[in-house]
Amino acid sequence: MDPSIILSAIVLLSAVAVVALRNPIHSALNLVVAMLGLAGIYAMLGAHFLAAVQVILYAGAVVVLILFVLMLLNLKVEQASPRDLVIQGLAVVSGVSFLAVAIPSVAQRFGSFPSARDVFVAARGPEVEGTVKNIGALLYDEYLLPFEVASVLIMAALVGAVLLGKRRRDTAK
Amino acid sequence: MMTLGHYLTVATALFTIGAVGVLVRRNAIVMFMCIELMLNAVNLAFVALSKTVGNLDGQIVVFFVMVVAAAEAAVGLAIIISVFRARRSVDTSRTRELRL
Amino acid sequence: MELLILGIKVFIVFNIIMGLASFCTWFERKGSALIQDRIGANRAGAFLQTDILLLKPVFFAFRFLGVLGVINTLFCDAVKGMLKEDFVPKGTSQFMHSLAPFLAVLPIFVAFALIPFAPDFVVGGYNIRMQVATLDVGVLFILAMGSLAVYGVALAGWTGNNKYSLLGALRAAAQMISYELAMGITFVCVILMYGTLDLYEMVTAQQGGSLGVDRWGIFRQPISFIVLFIVGMAETKRGPFDLPESESELVAGYFTEYSGMKFLTFWLGEFAEIALFALLLTLLFFGGWDIPFVSLEPGSWLTALIGHAVLMGKVIFFCMLQIVIRWTLPRFRYDQLMALGWKLCLPISMANLLWCAAMRLV
């Protein structure tokens, strides 16, 4: 069996677990499993650098941050009320019906690689592998401006997060 | 042999699961995790399409989406912590001051 | 056939990891004892006698090892750990309590898959590289596994269900993710120096050199070595950075609610991480299996064996250095620790990166 099928199954099952489990820490751990599964799929698709960045960034930093916040806030498991059940039921029904319509059409439309390639503009050259060297060459040559803008964005987010997280000592409650 | 349709199907399913999660859950942090699922679904679609088309533009887009998601995670969780300090709860059904 | 070679490589690497971790455990007990002006464990197995003449040398060897404390550390501790009562604190999920040791240890063991242990050699027509997985993103993968090691620590403290464990876990996790930044930037400096991410090619690039050692990493980028050494000790929560598990203050930090085999698993993971950092330092900065002024015939299995022995000698030196530093220096206070990570190591590693990039251009 192709490893991609197993990885896709792992990703989807853990995604359902993220949504369905009551304890938020269990949800966070299942999110880690989903991220790692996706990293595996990226590696199988030849995007090696992105697989490594997915593990370092998502599984290793974003979910750790989420886990930190969960442990610091020490939340209780959420209780359900009847009004919420109606909304939740409606949401699940609409999601399932959307999937029932979307998946067959997507699978049938993009079923095979050659026909999908005809749909899109012809490739710019021979197929490039997603190695660190190739992505680095592209990132610093053609996408230099978005790269610099992204670094400014990260700095803005850093300053914002520190500022929002600080306790204000002057306004006493 | 994995086809593009397979990966796009997984991406669609993942996105829908994330969207349903945002609607179903009331805990702000779990809603945040479902938003991360949606972003990852989009990343998967981009990577699969980049492999189809043959060049690396899709993977560069994924790189930037990851960067933006990380920045959003930091600021979003800081906001959630501030809200928690103000009202001792992250239950979104209890924050109804702006509702009609 | 390829699968068989891979299986043999995995088996060999696993044995190397367990051997290095066991050596570190033994040296921790005996070395710390000698530093603290006491003798340490020397009773178990030191009194074995036999009357059978043929077995006398064997029993002598056992008595020798027993006096050195080896039997005490490797055999008695293991048996004690396996036979102790294994409990789960009330009020937490048993599954997560049992999962935490695995999560702490698994990334470290997986990171060993990227490490080359000997130069290439040719056996029966196959060119064998003693590296379990040759990935395109070598050093980045090790960084990724270091990021994943935070989960075991955080989960261990959380499932302890008491404030000491939680405090220890949060401190440890914050420390690990703070020092990962400096580690990542130092790795970028090293990648700049060698122009490749693959560890095997990094070692190959250090061989040769007119003065024997002048192509070694330590002489080309000494600041990177110093920063990586400090950051490595902080990542493994060893040495002066071991406040999260500070034995005299937080009971046992995030280990508090663990006993028996699970505790030994954490311990094993910690020593395996020491071995991993010693290996990284050796491969990146000290030439790996390179012997200065000696060039051996490439491709023969004898070269591989000698290279492996040289590598293990250097790694054991660095393991012993880390253990001796741990027992020599007093530990940092937590705010001093975080200040060191954010205000000292990070700016120094960034300045180092600028300097190395400028040196590449010149």
Image (tube, coloured by chain):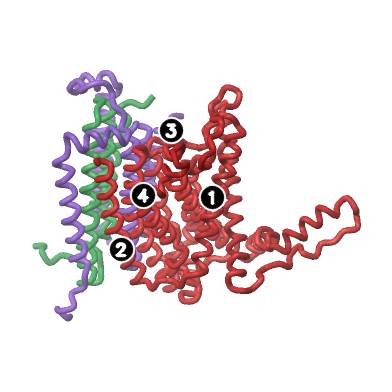
Residue at screen point 29% across, 63% down: C342
Left or right of C349 on screen, residue C16: right
Mark yes or no: residue C201 visible: yes
The relative height of residue C347 versus residue C41 in the rendered view (above or below) is: above
Whether labels 2 and 1 belong to a single chain: the reply is yes
The relative height of residue A121 versus residue C174 in the rendered view (above or below) is: above
Chain letter, colour purple in render: A
Whether labels 4 and 3 belong to a single chain: the reply is no
- The image shows residue B43 at horizontal and vertical percentages of 26, 39
Left or right of C60 on screen, residue B46: left
Closer to the eye: label 4 or 2: 4
Q: Colour of chain C?
A: red
Whether labels 1 and 4 belong to a single chain: the reply is yes
Q: Which mark is residue C344?
A: 2
Tell me which numbered mark, 2 or 1, is placed earlier along the sequence.
1
Closer to the eye: label 3 or 2: 2
Residue topped by disc 1: C314
Q: Amino acid at mark 1?
A: Lys
Whether labels 3 and 1 belong to a single chain: the reply is no
Residue topped by disc 3: A3
Residue topped by disc 4: C221
- The image shows residue A161 at horizontal and vertical percentages of 20, 61
In which chain is the residue bearing label 3? A
Q: Are marks 4 and 3 in contact (CB under 8 Å)?
A: no
* Mark 2 closeness class: few <14, some 14–19, many ≥20 residues within 10 Å: few
Choose top left, top right, bottom left or bottom right for residue B32: bottom left
In whole angstroms, how far apart are the C-alphas of marks 1 and 4? 19 Å
Left or right of C67 on screen, residue B31: left
Which quadrant is the N terminus of chain B positioned in? Answer: top left
In which chain is the residue bearing label 1? C
Residue at screen point 36% across, 49% down: C221
- The image shows residue C260 at horizontal and vertical percentages of 60, 63
